[in-house]
Amino acid sequence: MLDTKEPGFRENVDLMFRRAVSHLDLPPGLAAKIQICNSTYTVRFGVRLRGKIETFVGYRSVHSEHMEPVKGGIRYAPEVHQNEVEALAALMTYKCALVETPFGGAKGGLCIDPRNYEEHELEQITRRFAYELAKRDLIHPAQNVPAPDMGTGEREMAWIADQYARMNTTDINARACVTGKPLNSGGIKGRVEATGRGVQYALQEFFRHPEDVAKTGLTGGLAGKRIIVQGLGNVGYHASKFLRDEDDAIITAIIERDGAISNPNGLDPDALRDWIAQHGGVKGFEGGEYVADGAAMLEAECDILIPAALEGVININNAERIAAPLIIEAANGPITANADDILREKGTVIIPDLYANAGGVTVSYFEWVKNLSHIRFGRMQRRNEEAHAMTLVRELERLSADKNLGWELSPDFKRRYLQGADELQLVRSGLDDTMRTAYQSISEEWHRRSDVKDLRTAAFIVAIERVAASYRAKGL
Ligand SMILES: NC(=O)c1ccc[n+]([C@@H]2O[C@H](COP(=O)([O-])OP(=O)(O)OC[C@H]3O[C@@H](n4cnc5c(N)ncnc54)[C@H](O)[C@@H]3O)[C@@H](O)[C@H]2O)c1
């Protein structure tokens, strides 16, 4: 929650945007055009539940249509409001530009606490919300493609896709109207894990840049780094799981709604997630010490802090006391613009949201392409890869026979080699490549401009230049 002494979420994004623009030489008026949110549609609809009509309020903001469709998740949370949805939509514009997915930015929100409803009630509400948006083309494969965000997931996306398909029975591309669907409804392997996976790839790439790591005062790689994570939802869970299991990082604390669990020797995110599912919170979990004041754990000693829940959690009230030398913004907008100034002064390195959590939209892009092409992702590449692999295996065998080298390719090697890559491998390698390339462009900008002091400004600069180039190329 933002402190009342702080600007709102959208104003925070705008402040960060303007800081970046001050380093650029854009034609008059263009920065203002890019910054402004094009439209926000507010919908109020009634659903008959438990014998009475309940009215819900939802939003769909379109920040920029310099590319279409526009793309951005739908959030279910009780306190969703227009300012927040517009801020998130703006971040989507910059995020898509940064990872070069051909989308404009959008975002949606519904004021609801999903925990208060049964599954069939949520389905009824979601279908009605989807109907209200789809009939105005605010859900559409060529114009406006939602995805999951806080409080929504595959289940809600399947309902939205089905609702759209029922309303557009002759639209052969109907499945591409939303991403983040379950596999059996046209989803793609690796989408559920994608944002957390992207956070992992972002950190891996950061640690491949010793000059950048040196600015944090940290040394070495990810192995052994002490990490605190806020929010064990989709993004926080996958990021902590992969960093622990694959990079040997130590998750020393996890902060949730009802407090935090800390253990200097490391927590098991799977065990804690199971505990939360059974008990509704972290309290009582035996794998670590319970701390009632969860937010205070943001200030605890660690090497890397990963806020993966709400916006504005690092603000003027606690920024000075944040001990982590490196923060990666898995959530959108977890650091206010004022806190960002304080942390920059302190020398804290921040890997910003518009890059750090772009894994979701990147894999959503793969899913959208898969839906439009009506072919399993990688199916065509696989035939190609198989042909190449076959040639290579034959070459190796021929070389071995010609030169009498006595090489014997094991049947297992041949089988695995000829099998080609499956969808999940292709998605992961495509995501890894995207996260590496995007980081390199940000880091280069950071080092190239002596007056740019942080990765966030560098990331905004890269993104704004790309959006500006798009406007310049096609006019307004
Ligand atoms: N899901 C995606 O693909 C995606 C993509 C990009 C960015 N994001 C961003 O990541 C963040 C998290 O999204 P998500 O999809 O993981 O949501 P989620 O609903 O799956 O998880 C959010 C988690 O945060 C916890 N939480 C809520 N309030 C809290 C509090 N006050 N303190 C500590 N924990 C709290 C919840 O209990 C939950 O476990 C959001 O900012 C979202 O915009 C998500």
Image (cartoon, rainbow, N blue to C red):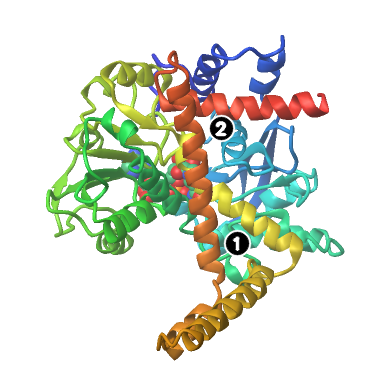
- Neighbour tally class for label 2: few under 14, some 14-19, many 20 plus, Cα within 10 Å: many
Give whichever of 23, 63 is nearer the camera.
23
Q: Which mark is residue 181?
A: 1
- Neighbour tally class for label 1: few under 14, some 14-19, many 20 plus, Cα within 10 Å: many
Q: Nearer the viewer, mark 2 or mark 1?
A: 2
Q: Earlier in the sequence, mark 2 or mark 1?
A: 2
Real-space Cα separation, disc 2 to disc 1, in angstroms = 22 Å
**Residue carrying label 2:** 91
Residue 61: in sight, yes or no? yes
Where does residue 349 sit, x and y in percent of width and height? 33, 28
Q: Is residue 446 left or right of residue 169?
A: left
* Res 413 → quadrant: bottom left
Where does residue 213 sit, x and y in percent of width and height? 30, 34
Instruction: Name the residue: 33% across, 41% down.
Output: 306
Q: Which residue, as the protein is rendered here, is positioned at the far top?
A: 28
Q: Measured along the vertical axis of the image, is residue 149 above or below residue 439?
A: below
What's the amino acid at mark 2?
Leu
Question: What SS does tag 2 mark?
Answer: helix
Mark 1 C-beta closer than 8 Å to ligand 1: no
Give whichever of 306, 355 is nearer the camera.
355
Q: Measured along the vertical axis of the image, is residue 68 above or below residue 147?
A: above
Where does residue 160 sit, x and y in percent of width and height? 67, 57
Residue 112: in sight, yes or no? no
